[in-house]
Image (cartoon, rainbow, N blue to C red):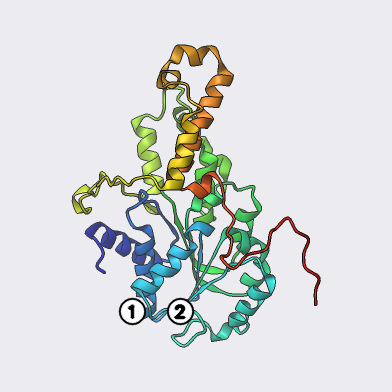
Amino acid sequence: GDLKPYQKVGFNWLVSLYDQGLNGILADEMGLGKTVQTIALLSFLAEQRGHWGPFLVIAPTSTMHNWVSEMAKFCPEMKVIPYFGANPNERKLLRRMWSNPTALGSPGAPFHVLVTNYKLIVSDEKHFARVKWQYMVLDEAQAIKSSQSQRWKTLLAFPTRNRLLLTGTPIQNSMAELWALLHFIMPELFDSFTDFTDWFSKDIESSAEGKGGGMDQQQLKRLQMILQPFMLRRTKQDVLDELVRKVEEEIRTPLSKRQRYYYDMLKKRVISASELLDRRMLGKDDKRLHSLMNLVMQFRKVCNHPEIFERRDFISPLHFRDPSLPPLPVP
């Protein structure tokens, strides 16, 4: 697939960072393709620059499969290892692929990209630290927003040539969280949290808390000046003309027999529709409000899938024996 124009801008920015030996934060709004821009960078480094990794991608467990599937889709020539699982013996087998670090970094290496989650990167830290990673990518990088966490300290010590943070929310609640991200990518430049906060933290934090005031134009320009070399952020509004037109289609589906049965059963517990809508009645009785809100949630479960509302044990058609009878003796 081809990158959209704004994604090409992001890709070129990432390449520029790499060439200058700098780390960065790709902070595009969710849905603008931070993953595909990153994959384009890794593919470029391998095919055009001859740097075949090893690349380390750390992501929430929920997005690991997406990383693996997107890598297979856009650059199938790169070998990807999904490193996860609760069984330590299975992970030990995977680690054999980098038992000889000197064999990594070439087209014929056992793997080029390793995808894992934040939990395993800490628990198996000593094994990952044996490898000199070419690039370390942190997806949903707000996961390291606390500089006091063991996760942040562990990853900060990892041997890697470059670091890239992906997050749709680079500035959340405090300057401490922003400093944790900036120190992670440029520890020598942003070495002192005290000096960093002395510039403008009080105004930003008071603005975030809705206390009024906020940053003046000079402070805002100062923040933009600091972030500009290391962070690229675009919102959907910024690139609206380049996005595919959104089409919403409503498809109504009838309830199944089982859903209808549960739905009618719940309806009998509601005296009337006015009981749900009469705010004066609800305002007088918090317990009644809680009961009705719980009922609404039960309706939602039934409509989504009856198994969410009440699980039904599977019974094989070959099961003839009465379960109340004692088990047959073992022959």
On the question of residue 199 being in view, the answer is no
Crowding around mark 2 (Cα neighbors within 10 Å: few <14, some 14 to 19, many 20+) is: some
- Residue 48 image label: 1
Q: Residue furthest left?
A: 241
Residue type, mark 1 in image: Gln
> Residue 36 appears in which quarter of the rendering?
bottom left
First in sequence: mark 1 vs mark 2: 1
The residue under the point 51% across, 60% down is: 59
Say which of 189 and 113 sits in front.
Answer: 113
The residue under the point 48% across, 13% down is: 281
Residue type, mark 2 in image: Lys
On the question of residue 323 being in view, the answer is yes
- Residue 79 image label: 2
- In this image, 20 relative to 115: left or right? left
- In this image, 117 relative to 21: left or right? right
- In this image, 34 relative to 290: left or right? left
> Residue 100 appears in which quarter of the rendering?
bottom right
Helix, strand or loop for disc 2: loop
The residue under the point 41% across, 18% down is: 274
Up the image or down, 242 lies above or below 202; here it is below
Up the image or down, 330 lies above or below 106; here it is above
Say which of 11 and 256 sits in front.
Answer: 256
Say which of 256 and 108 sits in front.
Answer: 256
Q: Residue 191, position in %: x, y? A: 56, 50
How much space separates mark 1 and mark 2, taking CA atoms? Answer: 17 Å
Helix, strand or loop for disc 1: loop
The residue under the point 35% across, 49% down is: 233
